[in-house]
Amino acid sequence: MSGANNGPLAGVRVVDLTSVVVGPICTRTLADQGAEVIKIEAPEGDLLRTLGGRGRNPGMNGKFINFNRNKRSVCLDLKRPEARAAMLRLIEGADVFVTNIRPAALDRLGFGFEALHARAPKLIHCTILGFGRGGRYCDKPAYDTVIQGVSGVAGTFTQSNGTPRYVPMVMADHICGLTAAQCIGFALYRREKTGVGEAIEVPMFENMAGFVMAEHMGAMSYDPPLGAPGDQRLLSPDARPLPTKDGYISISANTNAQAFGLFAAIGRPELKDDPRFVSVTTRTAHTPEYFAIRAEALRQKTTAEWLEILSKADVPAMPCSTLEGLPDDPHLNDVGFFTEENHPTEGKLKRFRPANQFGGGMREGSLPSPTLGQHTAEVLREAGCDPAEIEAMLASGAAR
């Protein structure tokens, strides 16, 4: 395995039986911090290899590449007993097993927690579920859009624009993938003290329901409720990037100093004495009026003019970036966020580095995102499989 590695998870081996986004986000996070991640793929490959859109070569689109850096790919047909046996060898030599296969299917394969714990008692077994076990939805399939809908994320847009809609990112997958990585880190820490592995279940619905309700449960937190749920500062139609003369600007003015600075900046200093706006409490109670005044004022000047004025007033404000413009953001270029890579099969690529830095070191460089089955023979040899056994599996289609 190439690539210098002194990251905080160096020496941790992860067997990754996940696909699409939520699982690969989890394991990419572990890989970026130094873990050795072995990505197990079926003969048809991770669905994201085709679902992720156009690429230079089949199965290697930009989305797959971005979610699967620093991993090695092993292609096994787990319907075949010899492939399952090879998989068990890999798991027995691992510290962590991560999957987003539904529990019943996982048990049929023989990779449920109880079966694996008997073989590898120090193994940390993480299952990412659509819905937690014990509830009536537990066997239902789930994708990000399904979870955004049922958890209330999509419904929060109803109040601001009259109709539910999805956040145009796989936000639930990202949040739950990062949550799973966090849980695995906690479990690794506990194993250092106890020497024993454990099962982790990360249900997407419950995680996202908690995410939504932490923001919006509000007055419903009390018994009896003190009012309707929902943070009006977030649900207001004007809680959005606001139009200027020539574009959009993102602004937030929450403290008294920020709000009064905003009033002075827009030429309405008298508003700081308006009973509706004299405090955080009164401005929150009059969110629609406060936001409407803000929105109307910002239409009067260009984005650049407002950025200069608001900066002098110490009011938090930044331009609203576009997808096309973000790679040219000067701050991101200052900190070296975007890098270039010469991928062995895909040629020159623009990449982004992990945002979080560890003073004790992290992986130096990046392993290129793998082609399907690129490391099958290599990894199986490392797991102790006989060369003749590997050749037989490749010849029969049990491995690729």
Image (tube, rainbow, N blue to C red):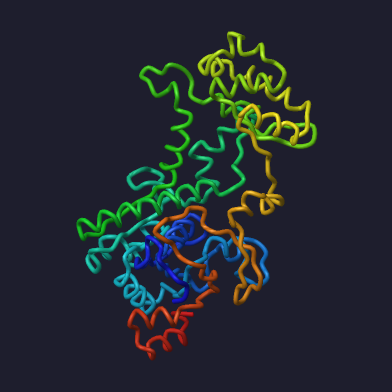
Looking at this rendering, what residue extends furthest in the bottom direction? 388
User: Which of the two residues, 345 or 97, is positioned nearer the viewer here?
Assistant: 345
Task: Name above or below for residue 153 compared with residue 371.
Answer: above
Looking at the image, residue 50 sits to the left or right of residue 201; the answer is: right
Indicate the quadrant where residue 306 lies.
top right
Residue sticking out furthest to the left: 194
Q: In the image shown, does 299 or 40 lie closer to the viewer?
A: 299
Instruction: Give the farthest residue toward the front.
Output: 312
Q: Which is nearer the eye, 310 or 152?
A: 310
Residue 380's image quarter? bottom left
Give the percent coordinates (x, y) of residue 356. 48, 53
Query: Can you give x and y, in whole percent of width and height, for residue 274 in the image?
Result: 61, 9
Q: In which quarter of the image is residue 246?
A: top right
Left or right for 267, reference 370? right
Q: Which residue is drawn at 35% across and 73% down?
A: 90
Rendering coords of residue 172 (x, y %):
50, 46
